[in-house]
Image (spheres, rainbow, N blue to C red):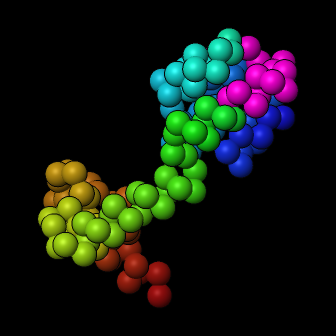
Amino acid sequence: MAHIAGIEIPKNKRLFIGLTYIYGIGPTIAKDICRKANVDEMKKVEDLSVEEEKAIRDVVQNDYTVEGALRTQVAMNIKRLMEIGSYRGMRHKRGLPVRGQRTHTNARTRKGPRAGAIKKKK
C-alpha cells in the first residue's frame, strides 16, 4: 500500500481513484497530481514504483493543502464567520442550514430529530 499524506491508499484501485481517499483531493485534482508527477493515472496503486510514489508524495506535499491542515483551515474559517457575527456564522452557531435551504420542512440533518420525537423516548 502507498502511504501519502498520512493516508494508506488502497492498492487494488487505480491511482487517480486511490488519491481521492485523501481529504481535500477529488477526481480533478487527483488527475492534476498524476500529470505533475508524470505518472499514468490509470496505473494500479500496487504497480507504482518507489520513485513514482515519491514523486506523487512530493507533489501533494508541496502544491496542495490536504488532511489535517485543510480541516484546521476550514474550522478556522467557520470560527471567523461566527466571531464577526455574519449571517452565515449565526447559522453555524444555531446549527441551521447555512446556504439558503428551506427549514419549514426538511433540514432534519442540521436541526436534529423533531422535539416531539425526543420527548416520546421517556
Q: Residue at x 85, y 26 (%)?
A: 50
Q: Does residue 74 appear in the picture of this structure?
A: yes
Q: Quadrant of residue 87?
A: bottom left
**In the image, residue 75 lies at what x, y percent?**
41, 63
Asked if residue 120 is positioned above or below residue 109 in the image, the reply reads below
Viewer-side residue, 114 vs 34: 34
**In the image, residue 17 lies at what x, y percent?**
63, 25
From the viewer's perspective, is 73 left or right of 69? left
Asked if residue 41 is positioned above or below residue 4 in the image, the reply reads above
Q: Quadrant of residue 85?
A: bottom left
Q: Main secondary structure of the magenta part?
A: helix
Viewer-side residue, 110 vs 29: 29
Q: Residue at x 16, y 59 (%)?
A: 104
**In the image, residue 30 lies at what x, y percent?**
56, 26
Q: Residue at x 70, y 20 (%)?
A: 14
From the viewer's perspective, is 99 left or right of 26? left
Task: Give the residues drawn in magenta, as a range.
Answer: 41-56
Q: Residue at x 40, y 79 (%)?
A: 118
Q: Does residue 95 appear in the picture of this structure?
A: no
> Residue lying farthest bottom?
122
From the viewer's perspective, is 38 left or right of 100? right
